[in-house]
Amino acid sequence: MSKPPRDRFDEVPRSTGRVGAHRAEAPGMNGWVVLLWSFVAALVLIIAGIFGALAVMGRIELFPDAAPSAVATPEETGVIDPTYSVLILNATPDNGLDDQMRDTLINAGWAADTVLASDSESDDFATTTVYYVSAEDEEAAMGLAGVIGGAEVQQSDYYAGQTEDGQKQLTIVIGVDRAASVPETPAP
């Protein structure tokens, strides 16, 4: 077998230390850069973990269903029915609110003899409310609440025996929300 020809690299003296680029020390890294990259990596992992946990627990939806098209639902406004007898009770310290409300209803079409106005036993009722007795009276109560400029509507038979037999009735209790002066300690 023949020997390869000799060249200038055959004369390199042998050293006892490391030789070659693969054995060189890594170039110096700045400690702050390493710390910053560590912080960013930890933050990304924490956020991904929280997001994943919320998705698994069902607290957030990854792919929510398409929102239904905005279809305007009609708001129940009720029916204005002047055949109902209306009892108006002023439960505020202001005098004359019941008469003003009576005039409003008479101007809206109620007969003067079907609208009764009086003061209530208390003068600290919180919110103006229209009361009706049976479920079929609810729409008329909502219509009456609209006529007087908005009020709560509730079903109650507390005022049921206030009219002649067979007469349909609604009751308005005027609250301090309509009064100019407010009592010092409102009732619960």
Image (tube, grey):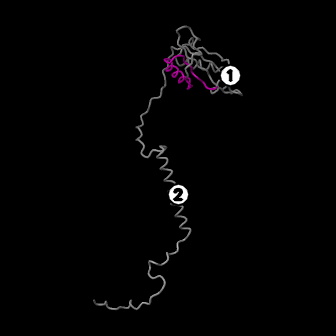
| Quadrant (top left/top right/bottom left/bottom right) for the C terminus | top right
How many C-alpha atoms fall within 10 Å of the one at disc 2: few (<14), some, or many (≥20)? few
Helix, strand or loop at label 1? It is loop
What residue is disc 1 on?
123
**Front-lying residue, 5 or 66:** 5
Residue type of the residue flagged with mark 1: Asp
Residue 179 occupies quadrant: top right
Q: Is residue 48 positioned above or below 26 on the image? A: above
Magenta region includes residue 108: no
In this rendering, would 144 be left or right of 64?
A: right
**Front-lying residue, 171 or 108:** 171
**Front-lying residue, 87 or 112:** 87
Q: Residue at x 52, y 55 (%)?
A: 46
Residue 157: x percent and y percent? 57, 16
Q: Residue at x 35, y 91 (%)?
A: 7
Magenta region includes residue 135: yes
**Front-lying residue, 169 or 19:** 19
Q: Label for residue 43?
A: 2
Q: Earlier in the sequence, mark 1 or mark 2?
A: 2
